[in-house]
């Protein structure tokens, strides 16, 4: 997936990443089962989409772009973290960082933390927000 907005993504894959309230916008952009990411980027800037929703979608696109190099449980953990406000973790993920193995290193470390904390990192983030 080209997260810089130069490529395409299947409509089904993009719908799985965006909040429900953005579904109609995505469906309106689709052509032959795909959405051009440049058109998607333009549409979200024109619509009243919250900054938080944009950050989550951006993080999930970056995560999806690394699916080929990450085990499924690590992809799932990354998506949980993005959904829980930890989108900053994925901002540096791009093609260059993926080639350097940086997403693999980060997710290996986070997976270790996730398995050691009672309830996992999702629970850790939840408690940290309360404090």
Image (cartoon, rainbow, N blue to C red):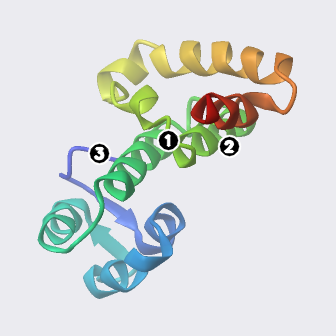
SS at circle 2: helix
Where is residue 11 shown, x and y percent of the image?
42, 73
SS at circle 3: loop
Is 7 positioned to the left or the right of 67 in the image?
Answer: left
Residue 113 sits above or below residue 94 on the image: above
Name which quarter of the figure residue 25 lies in: bottom left
- Of pointers 3 and 2, the one earlier in the residue sequence: 3
Residue 76, numbered circle: 2
Q: Around disc 2, counting alpha carbons within 10 Å, would you say few (fewer than 14), some (14 to 19), or many (20 or more)?
A: some
Residue 84 sits above or below residue 13 on the image: above
Disc 3 to disc 1, C-alpha distance = 19 Å
User: What residue did someone put label 1 on?
Assistant: 85
Q: Around disc 1, counting alpha carbons within 10 Å, would you say few (fewer than 14), some (14 to 19), or many (20 or more)?
A: some
Q: What residue is at 87 percent from the left and 26 percent from the top?
A: 118
Q: Nearer the viewer, mark 3 or mark 2?
A: 2
Q: What residue is at 49 percent from the left and 46 percent from the top?
A: 64
Where is residue 52 shown, x and y percent of the image?
36, 52
User: What residue did someone put label 3 on?
Assistant: 3
């Amino acid at each position: 997936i080209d997260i810089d907005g130069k490529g395409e993504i299947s409509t089904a894959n993009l719908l799985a990443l965006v909040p429900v309230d953005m579904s109609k916008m995505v469906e309106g952009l689709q052509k032959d089962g795909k959405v051009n990411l440049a058109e998607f980027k333009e549409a979200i800037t024109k619509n009243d989409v919250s900054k938080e929703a944009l950050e989550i979608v951006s993080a999930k696109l970056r995560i999806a772009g690394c699916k080929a190099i990450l085990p499924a449980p690590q992809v799932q953990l990354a998506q949980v973290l993005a959904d829980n406000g930890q989108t900053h973790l994925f901002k540096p993920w791009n093609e260059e960082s993926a080639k350097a193995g940086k997403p693999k290193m980060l997710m290996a470390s986070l997976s270790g933390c996730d398995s050691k904390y009672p309830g996992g990192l999702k629970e850790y983030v939840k408690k940290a927000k309360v404090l």
